[in-house]
Image (cartoon, rainbow, N blue to C red):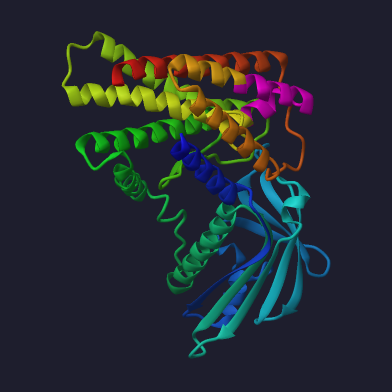
Amino acid sequence: MVVTILFLGAILLLIWLLLAAPLGCRTLSNQITVRARREDVWSALFPFGQSFDWDKGVTHVVRHSGLAGTMVTTQDDRDGKPIRRDFVIDRLQPYDCFSLQYTKDSALDDAFWRDFVRTVHLSQAATDLETTIKINETDRYRGIAFLVFRWFARRRSLRKLKLWLKTGEYRPGGVFENPYVQATVAIGSTVLLWPLFGLTQSGLIMSSVLTAVVALHEYGHVLAFRLMGHKTARMIFVPLLGGIAIGSRPYGRHYEIAFSALMGAGFSVFASALVLTALGLAPPLHAEIEFALWFFVFVAGAFNAANLLPIYRFDGGQLLRQVFRTPLQLGVATVILAWVFVLLSLYAGMPYEYVLAIIGVALSLSWLTNRSGVKPSRPLTPMTGYERVAISSAAIGTITFHAFAIQIALEKLV
């Protein structure tokens, strides 16, 4: 019990550090030397430069009076129109440095860019044909994850700029999103998880099953994005931490968020049901194969049920906030859902000490991470009564199925 509490506490601390720790204003710095004249680099980095659209992320820039303008991006907002960002330039020294601040975003609330400042410095390197680029970005951060993401995104952008200045070629995407790289990451994650289950054949099966469950869960989110009208959607594996599903535009409706959140666990219902059907109809299987299938049912149930806990940043918290819009409704629904998890977990055979510890960690985590959301520029379209009933019924069915699947699998595994 002590080990379990310490383990859950460590997970709580890790997630808080990644998603919600108040880091204050931080400045990230990236630097690279490219083989190009300062004038050419300036043209690519200065918003009013002739080559500013080199990365294809911006179609054009509309210049207003003075040093203010609007970037028209290639990314669509929830209405299918290009996202527009107003900006102002400060500390301008031509071909040397400038600072940029965003003042308005057609997709996000203005508060998102309130503390953001990007400063670009150009300096001559060893020869006139080499330029050193240094970019500092200052912003207010909650959680290490977004800070690290920003640093790597800027680093990747500079490397693409270096290639473009050298060859005139722009390569969209990145190495990490490449399907082969993602497959390698998934295999690597499986290997890293292997020691946690024991360096045996059964341990390898268990770590492989966990990776497969994560992949199916994220594919459910990807499928939901496509059903909700996203032109593209992709899944990215994050070693040891799971995966992330990314759509092609901001959300437009509360129902869209709830449906996308539920489909992670909901899609796994179909996979688990197929496995249970196969186990019931198939002739006696090899012991290792049968163990792998029953362990899949158990892990799929436990992983997806945990994602539907009423935690702010988890799928369950996302879903609850869309269905119940007032603080009172949300509070009552959170307590009821927590008790549902307690009862179903006890029914599945889990010791009550572990159940109470998990619920305590879940509620603590929800409280610790409930201040780090990103608001859209305009209110989302509310749910209809039919949509609330449909999502609530589907959520109850999904949770119940996974609870029964855990109970059946435990009887076979223990």
Locate residue 107, reporting x and y percent: 70, 45
Q: Is residue 315 above or below residue 104?
A: above
Residue 50 lies left or right of residue 330; in this view the side is: left
Q: Hey, which residue is sitting farthest right in the picture?
A: 65
Region in magenta = 318-338
Q: Quadrant of the C terminus?
A: top left
At 62% from the left and 56% from the top, the residue drawn is 59
At 37% from the left and 47% from the top, the residue drawn is 182
Closer-to-camera residue (159/140)? 140
Locate residue 258, reporting x and y percent: 61, 27
At 71% from the left and 46% from the top, the residue drawn is 108
Residue 394 lies left or right of residue 167; in this view the side is: right
- Specify whether residue 84 is painted magenta: no
Q: Is residue 134 visible?
A: yes
- Specify whether residue 327 is painted magenta: yes
Locate residue 72, reporting x and y percent: 68, 54
